[in-house]
Amino acid sequence: MKQIMILFSIALLVLVRPTSAQQESSFKHLIDIGSGRHLNMICVGKGSPTVVFLQGHTGNITDWRMVRGPVSAFTRSCFYDRAGMGFSDPSTKSMTAENVADDLHALLRAAKIEGPVVLVGHSLGGLFATFYADKFPSTLAGLVLVDPSFSGQFDYMVGPNDRKIITQDNDHWDSLLMTCEKLAQADQLSKDDNHDCFHARTNLTPEETDYVTSQFYRPSYYASLRSEYENFDVVKSAAPPDGEQERRLAHPFGNMPLEVLTAELTFSGATVSGTGRKTIEAVWRSGHDKLAQRSKRGESIMIANSHHFIQLDQPDAVVSAIRKVVLEARQ
């Protein structure tokens, strides 16, 4: 299913119930962030600054599997699950950009990660990373935004037919998440009857599969996804909280190292008309250029032969951008 406006790409796995023995894996390290809540974060490698990765909507730590090794070879790299996802506890708050940023800030403090960090955000994770940079600038050494969502990405006009297609797609996704949450609450999701709540992805290791599939039985997983979606979806709100929050805090980033990567083929499979697709693409690319312009050292780069998941299609491009920002931050 194509989510044209928000690029919430779904890359899930066939569901298999993990055993209790499988629960203890290298993907699980819970950290107490206060108020009885724990978030899951794993770190590998050594060096400074620490690089922290934020995946997009419906994403998980394995989204970074192609860049994890190369990046951790030259600096410390940390990957975490947002509230309600992966092994992390759910939040009692709405999954707005500000609440996500506050959770991450509490997590980094609880994990005793010293010094400014580099954030790498993909898709919706890119908007979260940008907001974090706006709210906690002194804790940030640099940003790498991978085909990121951003405040203002819905500032375009398309024809009534395209608007109808976009609205129908988004409403279907919202309804599906609500249904999946109820099915999970009733323990009615299984490998043989997944109710279209998750789909096959077969290129992961058994340990990666156990990590990803463990969340699919949890109602909080679907509730968190739905909350993220509703706080960003312009169809649900004329002024989505995420966009308004980022607009409110947005400021120039000075000389902070900043790389913005745009995928050439993000909208290649769009179900809207050719004219509508060109309109959306223009706003998408212009928005990325404007993000890069917020820093005197910002750079906006088009990545050829890549769809929305640049880190999977062209991982070397993402690794190169991270290396550049890390080296600039060290200087």
Image: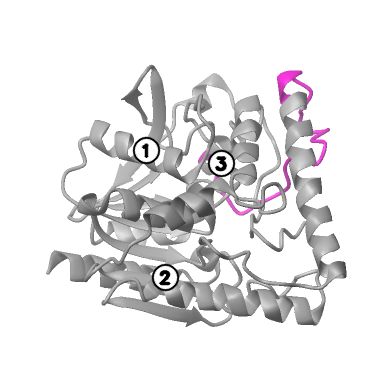
Q: Tag 2: residue type?
A: Leu
Magenta region, residue range = 184-207
Q: How far is disc 3 from disc 1 in space, using C-alphas?
A: 33 Å
Specify whether residue 54 is in view: yes
Residue at 71% from the left image edge and 75% from the top image edge = 268
Q: Tag 1: residue type?
A: Asp
How dense is the environment of label 1, judged by Cα within 10 Å: few (below 14), some, or many (20 and up)? some
Choose between 304 and 166: the one closer to the eye: 166
Secondary structure beneath dot 3 equals helix
Residue at 73% from the left image edge and 38% from the top image edge = 177
Residue 277 is labelled as none
Residue at 51% from the left image edge and 41% from the top image edge = 96
Front: mark 3 or 2: 2
Residue that mark 1 sits on:
102
Residue that mark 2 sits on:
291
Where's the N terminus, which quadrant? bottom right
Hey, which quadrant is residue 80 in on the image?
A: top left
Residue that mark 3 sits on:
206
Q: Position of residue 171 (x, y in %)?
A: 79, 47
Residue farthest left in this picture: 331
Secondary structure beneath dot 1 equals helix
Secondary structure beneath dot 2 equals helix
Q: Tag 3: residue type?
A: Pro
